[in-house]
Image: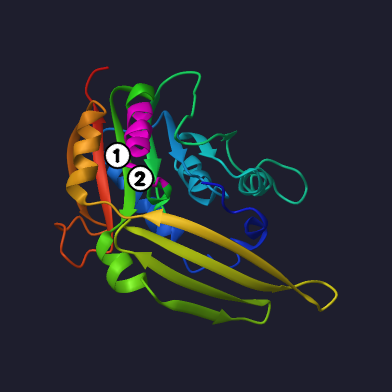
């Protein structure tokens, strides 16, 4: 799962088209719908902490977990203004692998967005993540996460290349989908302009796996959680054959 090393330095530059504010409003609305209006919330795969900070601004006490030291350093730095003043309520960032994360106590909710769960490549390890989530949730606590679908990997991303050229840099994002393993390989190449006018090249390879929705549901239930539902992302519409991203909601139902 090692990823986002040198690329972490330019991650937010090329993610500026992601509507984090709209996503956070949707996520906050879901949390409140299930009675989570305050308290401690854990974000798994928090990256540079953009969503973590937005949820903190919404009034939650946030913990962010990620296995990239570089991404977490950016997250910590982003919590302070240029004059060193803390911009958000104190956020606890933990450098941990979500497959074996540890907390000091339980939390009211766990969230994970931006297809972080797709980075778990084995069913056994996904079950392990779900079991840990269930273990650290308060009684009746809520787990909300999204995942890219198999349709998206097969029909939208698979065997495609996405390129973008800007004044400050360029990137090439190549996708290769393995139907047998249900794994999509992202090869990322970025050229970023530095202060001296020269360009530095960053290269990374990421792997994500697609899962059948019913498999995810079965693993949640095997982990001891109550499966509440799933829907087309950001719409609350039923899952369609052409859904590219799904939201899943589960509840702790007794350890």
* Residue at image point 38% right, 34% down: 129
Q: Is 191 a magenta residue?
A: no
| Residue 37 visible somewhere in the drawing | no
Q: Quadrant of residue 23?
A: bottom left
Q: Where is residue 29 in the image (x, y as percent from the top left)?
A: 30, 46
Q: What stretch is highlighted in magenta?
A: 120-133
Q: Where is residue 183 in the image (x, y as percent from the top left)?
A: 37, 58
- Crowdedness near tag 2: few (<14), some (14–19) or many (≥20) residues, C-alpha within 10 Å: some
* Residue at image point 20% right, 68% down: 242
Q: Is residue 66 shown above or below 35?
A: below
Q: What element carries label 1?
A: helix
In the picture of the structure, the residue carrying the numbered disc 2 is 28
| Residue 176 visible somewhere in the drawing | yes
Q: Position of residue 139 (x, y in %)?
A: 28, 20
Q: If the image is split into quadrants, where does the C terminus sit?
A: top left
- Crowdedness near tag 1: few (<14), some (14–19) or many (≥20) residues, C-alpha within 10 Å: few
Q: Is residue 178 shown above or below 90?
A: below
Nearer to the camera, 146 or 60: 146
């Amino acid at each position: 799962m090692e990823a986002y090393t040198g690329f972490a330095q330019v991650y937010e530059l090329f993610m500026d088209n992601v509507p984090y504010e709209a996503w956070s409003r949707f996520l906050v609305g879901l949390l409140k719908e299930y009675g989570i209006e305050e308290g401690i919330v854990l974000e798994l795969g928090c990256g540079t902490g953009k969503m973590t900070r937005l949820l903190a601004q919404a009034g939650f006490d946030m913990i962010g977990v990620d296995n990239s030291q570089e991404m977490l350093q950016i997250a910590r730095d982003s919590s302070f203004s240029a004059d060193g003043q803390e911009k958000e309520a104190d956020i606890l960032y933990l450098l941990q692998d979500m497959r074996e994360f540890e907390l000091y106590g339980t939390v009211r909710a766990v969230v994970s967005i931006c297809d972080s769960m797709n980075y778990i490549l084995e069913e056994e390890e996904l079950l392990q993540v779900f079991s840990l989530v269930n273990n650290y949730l308060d009684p009746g606590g809520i787990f909300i996460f999204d995942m890219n679908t198999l349709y998206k990997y097969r029909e939208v991303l698979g065997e495609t290349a996405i390129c973008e050229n800007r004044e400050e840099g360029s990137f090439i994002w190549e996708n290769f989908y393995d139907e047998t393993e249900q794994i999509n390989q992202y090869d990322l190449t970025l050229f970023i302009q530095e202060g001296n006018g020269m360009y530095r090249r960053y290269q990374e390879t990421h792997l994500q796996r697609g899962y059948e929705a019913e498999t995810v549901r079965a693993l949640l239930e095997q982990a001891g959680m109550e499966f509440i539902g799933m829907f087309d992302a950001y719409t609350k519409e039923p899952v369609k054959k052409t859904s590219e991203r799904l939201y899943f909601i589960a509840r702790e139902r007794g350890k």
